[in-house]
Image (cartoon, rainbow, N blue to C red):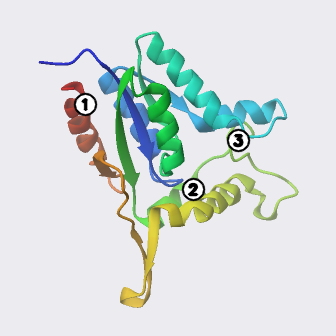
Amino acid sequence: MKSKKLKTVAIVGLVGSGKSSVAKYLAKLIGAKVISANSIRVALRKKGQGYGRVENMAEKEASSAVKKGKNVILDSDFVTSKKRKMLERKIGKAAKIFYLRTFSDRDVMIGRLVSAKYTPNDLYGGASTDWPGKNKGAVVALREMWRRTLHHYRWSEKNGGTFLLKKLPIKFVAEIDTTTQNWKIKVKRVAQKIKQF
């Protein structure tokens, strides 16, 4: 028998790992509202404000949606325990929280960031005439990926050295490799699993 308890899915994944694509697809399957931290950052940037309030704003929006009886998918990176604890404290009593991990081949992630079309309305900004290579968006996205890599990967000296996906102390409903298009099949399975709760 299905539970009537609301569901909140918090995604854990590096920049370029496919979090947004998975969030949008899963939202259609389980009937959920996607709350994107990047969209909040863009709105704050347009107002000339810093990003210090992003997490609080996302959690407020999620709490409000849950109070209105909606399932929620948080398109943000919940890799840190501080962020997960805050979410569990604010929403844990009203909704069942699921953590979902996205990852991809490192070269595929870099390719996604380099080939994406960035506009001034994107988080990472668009082309700039005073920026080397005129693609500020890709440079900023790659910098963010580089900055956060060690949260998700560990360095291994094997085979000449490579980054390996870290085992995280999080119970995931699933870990989805978005390297190839079959990730949608895995997301469908996740949706079925989530609906059972």
- How far from the left and from the top, in percent, is residue 78? 48, 45
Q: Residues within 10 Å of mark 2 (few under 14, many from 20)?
A: many
Label whose residue precedes the other's in the sequence (1 or 3): 3
Say whether marks 2 and 3 touch (CB < 8 Å).
Answer: no
Q: Residue furthest left?
A: 1
Q: Residues within 10 Å of mark 1 (few under 14, many from 20)?
A: some
Question: Would you place residue 67 above or below residue 35 in this image?
Answer: above
Q: Which residue is mark 3?
A: 119
- How far from the left and from the top, in percent, is residue 50? 79, 40
Q: Residue furthest bottom?
A: 160
Amino acid under disc 2:
Leu
Q: Distance from label 2 to label 3 (Cα)?
A: 13 Å
Amino acid under disc 1:
Ile
Q: Distance from label 1 to label 2 (Cα)?
A: 30 Å
Residue name at image x 73 percent, y 40 percent: 51
Helix, strand or loop under label 1: helix
Residue name at image x 28 percent, y 39 percent: 187
Residue name at image x 72 percent, y 30 percent: 43
- Residue sitting nearer the eye, 36 or 112: 36
Quarter holding the C terminus is top left
- How far from the left and from the top, in percent, is residue 98? 34, 36
Question: Would you place residue 145 above or below residue 183 in this image?
Answer: below
User: Left or right of 126: which side holds 170?
Assistant: left
User: Left or right of 30: which side holds 142?
Assistant: right
Helix, strand or loop under label 3: loop
For the residues carrying marks 1 and 2, which lies nearer the camera in this image? 1
- Marker disc for residue 194: 1
- How far from the left and from the top, in percent, is residue 61? 57, 22
Q: Which residue is mark 2?
A: 113
Say whether marks 1 and 3 touch (CB < 8 Å).
Answer: no
Helix, strand or loop under label 2: helix
